[in-house]
Image (cartoon, grey):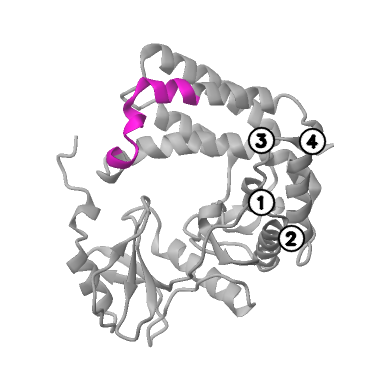
Amino acid sequence: MHSTPHPFATLSPARVVAAIESLGFWLPGEPFALNSYENRVFLLYDDEGRRWVAKFYRPGRWSDEQIQEEHDFLDELVAEGVAVAAPWRDDSGRSLHQMEGFRLALFPQLPGQAPELENPAHLFALGELIGAVHAVGERAEFQHRGRLDLDGMVHEARRRVLTAPWLERRQRQAYERISVELQEVLAAHAWAPEQTIRVQGDCHIGNLLGRDENFALVDFDDCLMAPAVQDLWMFLTAEHEAEWHMQLSEVLEGYEQHREFDRRELALIEPLRTLRLMRHSAWLVARWEDPAFPQAFPWVADAAYWDAHIRQLEQQRVALTRSSPWLA
């Protein structure tokens, strides 16, 4: 299945070191590979003891203009005192660098641990951080990055999953049926372009690092135009109503230190959850030719995974067709 070597297969530690040293750094040790699948990301130490994260972008995923817009947004945020890591720039002001067919950027490493979503102080801090990001994000629009598009992204996820070689006939039929039903239901939740702002786009706790009540937001690889709630809903993990409302209250109280939040966007949480579920499975299918994916996600080739995924989508269909009393 892997007749042609994947481009990342040639990205040896020696080539990583050579790439970074070509930018004028000297590295006394080897790079340490961090947990990343879409790109290849390494932790590095230079001869001055500074810690860097080198990000090698997946070939063909983003244009140079889209990557540069990510970098410029980060610079804009740092200039406003928002806790993010802006990319290093050389003496010519370049933040996106080229090395033997790879595009790479170098970021200062931000230490810390993931937040605790049952801790009210952490939730307030996360809301405050995202509010600060969005207060900057609403000032302008991305010109090259995409927009979160429910209908288009669900259609693409459906198309991709239906190419998966592991689906049994009954699973293929069940997936096709439920995905069509979901697309019809989700059409009623579409938002207008003017309801979108620049957001981080993939705001899960793995992209938030800090200590005590001070957190920073990392990895803007998926930044795009989207409703503000896209960067908030994954913090709301409680399974019981009282706890869910506690989480929401703390997050929004922190958020509104910087920017008002439109409560009507809470109705988008289940549509966004549905979209994420569908896109995740489609992403695994799309990236299967990358040898890192069969190693990390071997269960994708098992029928049990697809049975469970279809059941999840059935549950989402039910969630989408009833109004949640939690949002009253």
Residue at horizontal 74%, vertical 25%?
Answer: 322
Q: Is mark 2 on a helix, strand or loop?
A: helix
Which residue in the protein does label 1 denote? 232
Quadrant of the rendering where the N terminus is positioned: top left
> In this rendering, which labeled residue sits more in front, label 3 or label 4?
4
**First along the sequence among labels 3 and 2:** 2
Quarter of the rendering occupied by the C terminus = top right
Query: What amino acid is found at the position of numbered circle 1 in the picture?
Result: Leu
Image coordinates of residue 205 in percent, x first then y, are 55, 53
Name the image quarter holding residue 292. top left
Q: Tell me which numbered mark, 3 or 1, is placed earlier along the sequence.
A: 1
> Residue 326 bears which disc, if any?
4
Q: How far apart are marks 3 and 4 (CA)?
A: 12 Å
From this view, report whether residue 129 is shown above or below residue 6.
below
Answer with left or right where residue 143 lies relative to residue 162: right
**Type of the residue with mark 2:** Tyr
Circle 3 sits on which residue?
Answer: 270
Q: Can residue 51 be seen in this view?
A: yes
Determine whether label 1 and label 2 are within 8 Å by CB. yes
Which residues are the magenta region?
294-309
Q: Are there few (<14), some (14-19), or many (20+) residues within 10 Å of tag 2?
A: many
The residue lying at 58 percent from left, 21 percent from top is: 314
Q: Which residue is drawn at 51% across and 66% down?
A: 112
**Of marks 1 and 4, which one's residue comes earlier in the chain?**
1
Could you tell me which residue is drawn at 35 percent across and 59 percent down?
34
Marks 2 and 4, Cα distance to the nearest angstrom? 20 Å
The disc placed on residue 255 is 2
Task: Using the image as rendered, state which of residue 328 and residue 268 is in the foreground.
Answer: 328
Query: Looking at numbered disc 4 in the image, what kind of residue is underneath it?
Result: Trp
Residue 75 among those drawn in magenta: no
Closer to the N terminus: mark 1 or mark 2?
A: 1
